[in-house]
Image (cartoon, rainbow, N blue to C red):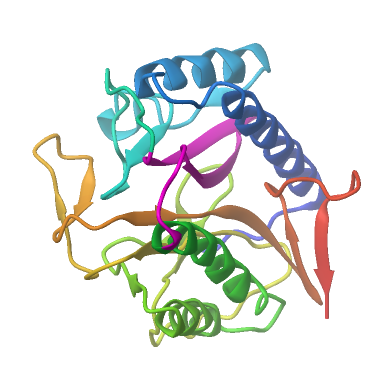
C-alpha cells in the first residue's frame, strides 16, 4: 500500500533529511586515505545517536553496521570492516536514519585521491542520472517515466544499469511501496502529491551483471569493474518535487515546480 504523507509527517521527514545531510557533512571531514571503513561507520553511528536519531540499518534484517560502505566494484551493502581506504578508491556511503519514527535515506559516492577520467565520469554521471530521473517527478507522472529517464541517461554515457536492486518508497518504514526501478519497466504506478520516494541509480562501468558475496550482504560486479551509487529522498508535490536530503543551496531546500 502506498503511503501519502500528511503535512505533519512531511515536516518530520524534512527534519530527518536535514539531520542526514548533517551526518554526511560529518563523515566527509574524516574520509581520507588510511582511515578504515569501520572507523567511518563508528563516526556516523556516534553522530546519529548524538543528534537524537536512530541508525536505521543497524540490525535491519541482521545487518551488522550503521551504514553501508561499498568500495570500487562493490555495488551496495558493503559491510564496514578493517579495510583501510586507499588512494584511487571510490567509496559509496549509504546512510539511513530515523527521526521520531520517520526515515531518510541517501547515498554518496566519494572519490579518494587520484583516479582516471573514466572513473570520475562514472561517479559524476551516476549523480546526473539521478537528476535525469528526478526531473520527471510531479503528481500524475508514472514511475516508468523516472525509470526510463535514468536508463536512457546511463546508456547515453555507456554505463550499465544494475537491475537486481531498485529505489523505493519511504516513511515510517525504510522500504515502502512503490518500487522505483532504474531501468525501463512497465510500472504504471502514478505518483501522487505527498508520496516520498528514494531514487537511487546504481551504474557500472562494465557489465550490469552482479553477484551476492558470501557475507550475504555485499553485492559486487561480476566483471570486477567499478560501480557508483547516488541516492536522495524525494517528496512528490503537485507540480514538481522537493529533495529532502540534498545539500542546501543558498540556505534553501532544493525544490522544483513545473
Residue that appears at 42% across and 72% down: 182
User: Does residue 234 lie above or below 45 as drawn?
Assistant: below
Q: x and y percent of residue 142 in the render? A: 56, 84
Q: x and y percent of residue 32 in the render? A: 48, 26
Q: Is residue 99 magenta?
A: yes
Q: Residue furthest left?
A: 214
The front one of 89 and 66 is: 89
Task: Evaluate whether residue 24 shows in this view.
Answer: yes
Q: x and y percent of residue 86 in the render? A: 35, 30
How many marks can you see? Answer: 0
Q: Is residue 224 left or right of residue 77?
A: left
The span shown in magenta is 88-117
Q: Is residue 57 left or right of residue 222?
A: right
User: Does residue 79 lie above or below 194 as drawn?
Assistant: above
Quadrant housing residue 34: top left
The front one of 160 and 257 is: 160
Amino acid at each position: 500500500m502506498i503511503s501519502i504523507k500528511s503535512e505533519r509527517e512531511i515536516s518530520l521527514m524534512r527534519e530527518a533529511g536535514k539531520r542526514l545531510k548533517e551526518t554526511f557533512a560529518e563523515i566527509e571531514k574524516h574520509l581520507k586515505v588510511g582511515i578504515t571503513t569501520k572507523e567511518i561507520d563508528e563516526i556516523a553511528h556516534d553522530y546519529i545517536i548524538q543528534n537524537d536519531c536512530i541508525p536505521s540499518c543497524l540490525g535491519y534484517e541482521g545487518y551488522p553496521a550503521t551504514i553501508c560502505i561499498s568500495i570500487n566494484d562493490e555495488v551496495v551493502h558493503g559491510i564496514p570492516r578493517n579495510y583501510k581506504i586507499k588512494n584511487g578508491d571510490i567509496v559509496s556511503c549509504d546512510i539511513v536514519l530515523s527521526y521520531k519514527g520517520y526515515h531518510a535515506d541517501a547515498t554518496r559516492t566519494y572519490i579518494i585521491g587520484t583516479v582516471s577520467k573514466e572513473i570520475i565520469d562514472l561517479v559524476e554521471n551516476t549523480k546526473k542520472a539521478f537528476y535525469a530521473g528526478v526531473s520527471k517527478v510531479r503528481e500524475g507522472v508514472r514511475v516508468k517515466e523516472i525509470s526510463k529517464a535514468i536508463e536512457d541517461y546511463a546508456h547515453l554515457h555507456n554505463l550499465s544499469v544494475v537491475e537486481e536492486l531498485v529505489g523505493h518508497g519511504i516513511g515510517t518504514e525504510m522500504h515502502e511501496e512503490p518500487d522505483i526501478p532504474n531501468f525501463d519497466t512497465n510500472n504504471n504506478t502514478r505518483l501522487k502529491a505527498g508520496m516520498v520516494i528514494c531514487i537511487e541509480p546504481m551504474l557500472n562501468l562494465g557489465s550490469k551483471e552482479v553477484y551476492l558475496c558470501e557475507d550475504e550482504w555485499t553485492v559486487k560486479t561480476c566483471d570486477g569493474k567499478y560501480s557508483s551509487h547516488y541516492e536522495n529522498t524525494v517528496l512528490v508535490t503537485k507540480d514538481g518535487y522537493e529533495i529532502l536530503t540534498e545539500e542546501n543551496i543558498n540556505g534553501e531546500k532544493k525544490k522544483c515546480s513545473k
